[in-house]
Amino acid sequence: MLQARRSPSIFIALLLAAGACDSTAAAPAADPKADAKAKEDADAKARIEKRKQEREAKEAAGVKEKADIAAKILEISVIPEGTKIPKKIAEACEMVVKAQGGFMKKFHPQVEESGVTTQLGLLSKQCLEMGNIKVALCQKFALEATTDLVAKSINEYLPTCMAKYGDEAGKPAGK
């Protein structure tokens, strides 16, 4: 009989142990605040990553545009083969002034005529002082070939032309 008395106590102990091992009964309930915080953190991280990608794409586009502009300036800052080279600097400078006038009418029609006239006078003076016919012709052809892409970069024409056609690594001839 002694054995019969132990059986119910062993049975009860086994039932209690089995209940303690039941994972569904011991699982804590999900914390809605923690879930909301985790979702909010994930959304914020996704927004930050998206902004980073947009910023990097914009920077890459800017770098590409600068490279495209530099390449276009090199392309248009040339004296085409077979061009008749004027004998006098004044003739070449007049060509540059005329090309600059056409550029201003095409890309800056809102500028008053008096402003354009003043600018063209300064350009003529600068060209005559420089004294390099080939650099002047290079500028003329670059101004005439200007596109929307390089319209804001015409100040790069003179240094580019001087590097290509100036004596002594870009210095004007005769200086």
Image (cartoon, helix red, strand yellow):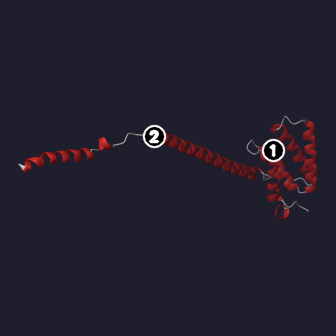
Give the amino acid at mark 1.
Glu
Rendered location of residue 37, percent (x, y): 50, 41
Rendered location of residue 162, percent (x, y): 83, 57
Give the amino acid at mark 2.
Asp
Callout 1 secondary element = helix
Rendered location of residue 38, percent (x, y): 48, 42
User: Residue drawn at (82%, 49%), measured in percent from left and top?
Assistant: 155
Instruction: Answer left or right for 123 relative to 150.
Output: right
Q: Quadrant of the C terminus?
A: bottom right
- Badge 2, how many Cα within 10 Å: few under 14, some, many 20+? few
The label number, if any, that marks residue 144 in the structure image: 1
Taking the view exactly as shown, the residue that stands out farthest to the left is: 1
Q: CA distance from mark 1 to mark 2?
A: 65 Å
User: Residue drawn at (88%, 43%), measured in percent from left and top?
Assistant: 98
- Badge 1, how many Cα within 10 Å: few under 14, some, many 20+? some
Q: Nearer the viewer, residue 85 or 164?
A: 164
The label number, if any, that marks residue 35 in the structure image: 2
Mark 1 near mark 2, Cβ–Cβ under 8 Å?
A: no
- Image depth: mark 1 or mark 2 in front: 2
